[in-house]
Image (cartoon, grey):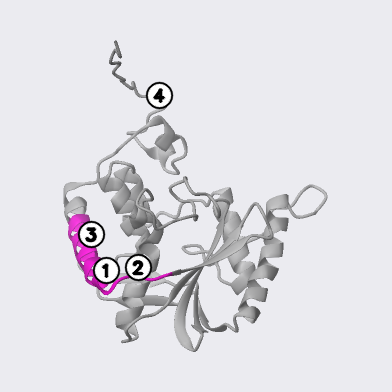
Amino acid sequence: MNDRKISQSILKRMQDYIEGEECGLKIKAQYVDGIVFPPSDVQLLGQWFEYECTGALPPYDSERIPEPKRLKNGNLAKAYERMEYQVANYHALLKHYDIKIKSIGEEIEYGDARGTTDIIAEVDGQIAIIDLKASGLIRDKWNPMGWEDIANDYKPKMKVLTQAIHYKYIAKNLFQTDDVPFYFWIFSTTNEKDNRIIKVEIDEDDYSLHERVLRDAKEYLEKTLKNGFKARPSMLRCRNCPIAHSCKEKTEFAEVETVYYTSQL
């Protein structure tokens, strides 16, 4: 357990668990037992898009080459057709900004932290990290995972920007430099003409804060492994859970919700 590295994805899942928003049995199955969950339709679309852009194979399933979804007549399904245009947009952006790709899918580690980058590239003469996103929420301001106005206080900043902070922390220490720029390249899955580039910058104090977050996360994970993950069954969680078929804690029924009415008279 002591050599377990902390990824940005487990940081986000543990945050969900602490806040009571995720089931511990699902986290344990995926991140401790190593069970590979079948990808959702949204994930399949994103994996195909990234493969077409960079040639990267899906994480945890590197033997599978992503295939597009096709209609009965052999044509691409509409979502994949839109993303085919976005692949062309990706290459146009590389050319426009004179991006020189150095590596694809490189694993980086420092201390207790690890991550797998989509792209390490030279941007404006400086080594930078580019992370590709295919999203239907590219202009959504109110969805917690929407990309509009992501740094505002009403957004769960920990969940949206954890990846950027995590990778910048690793790269800064690994490459022994003051800063490694991090960019989200976001391509809309609903509008083939819409994409965004977001550069994430953080204060120097955030690096020290993230180091403490990593240390606390590892200690919490070790303690939770020792004491056991708690099941948090609910109708909605269990309905879409990949391990529900073998889980003794699953439920198919809605919970009773209590609301209190206060007279305005």
Furthest residue in direction bottom, as rendered:
125
- How far is the residue under mark 4 from the one under mark 2? 39 Å
Q: Is residue 262 above or below residue 86?
A: above
| Amino acid identity at mark 2 | Ile
Residue drawn at 46 percent across, 63 percent down = 60
Q: Nearer the viewer, mark 4 or mark 2?
A: 2
Going from N to C along the chain, the mark reached first, 1 or 4, is 1
Q: Is residue 69 visible?
A: yes
Query: Residue tagged by mark 2?
Result: 165
- Label 4 CA crowd tier, 10 Å (few <14, some 14–19, many 20+): few
Report x, y in % for residue 253: 40, 24
Q: Secondary structure at mark 3?
A: helix
The answer to whether mark 1 and mark 2 are in CB contact below 8 A is: yes
Residue drawn at 65 percent across, 81 percent down = 95
Q: Is residue 10 above or below residue 203?
A: above
Going from N to C along the chain, the mark reached first, 4 or 3, is 3
Report x, y in % for residue 94: 61, 78
Query: Residue tagged by mark 3?
Result: 217
Query: Residue tagged by mark 4?
Result: 253
Going from N to C along the chain, the mark reached first, 1 or 2, is 2
Residue drawn at 42 percent across, 27 percent down = 252
- For residue 206, the mark is 1
Q: Nearer the viewer, mark 1 or mark 4?
A: 1
- For residue 222, the mark is none
Residue drawn at 56 percent across, 71 percent down = 56
